[in-house]
Image (cartoon, helix red, strand yellow):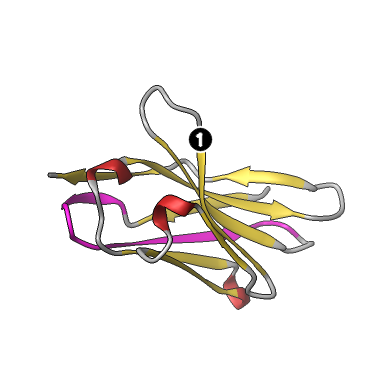
Amino acid sequence: QVQVVESGGGLVQAGGSLRLSCEASGSMFGFNVMGWYRQAPGKEPELVAGITSDDVRNYADSVKGRLTISRENAKNRVFLQMNSLKPADTAVYYCAADVGMGWETGRYWGQGTQVTVSS
């Protein structure tokens, strides 16, 4: 079945950097869009960044200029380079992978990786 696995979270001080990684697998139809969401305690999930197979990128206003999403299509991998981190970035970060056709059409989620930014 489809699996989405992310890693790279941790504890970092304000101004520091982290790099998140995600790999999606198990779909015979591939993944046309992948991206990152985050969810802070008591809040709704928020889109951080997304990327299509054609390298079209989208970012939340709060992270523009600080976070960069990239992809490696051969292995359905995406990365999120996180620089100049702020305490407001503290959240569980989830990788999302979209299957655009076939039986598996839908959005699939990883289990999340915790990012904590101290002041």
Report crowding for label 1: few under 14, some 14 to 19, many 20 or more residues within 10 A (C-alpha). some
What residue is drawn where x is 75% and y is 44%?
A: 106
In the displayed structure image, the side of residue 101 where residue 47 appears, left or right = left
- Residue 111, given in percent of the width and then of the height, sits at 47, 41
Q: Kindly identify which residue carries mark 1.
A: 45
Q: Amino acid at mark 1?
A: Pro
* Residue 11 in the image, given as x and y percentages of width and height: 19, 48
Q: Is residue 6 above or below residue 65?
A: above
75 sits to left or right of 41? right
Measured as percent of width and height from the top left, residue 87 is found at: 23, 43
**Residue at the spot x=64%, y=70% of the render?**
56
Q: Quadrant of residue 53?
A: bottom right
In what element is the residue under mark 1?
A: loop
> Which range is magenta?
9-27
40 is higher (above) or lower (below) than 89? above
Position above or below: 94 against 23: above
Based on the picture, tell me whether residue 21 belongs to the magenta stretch: yes
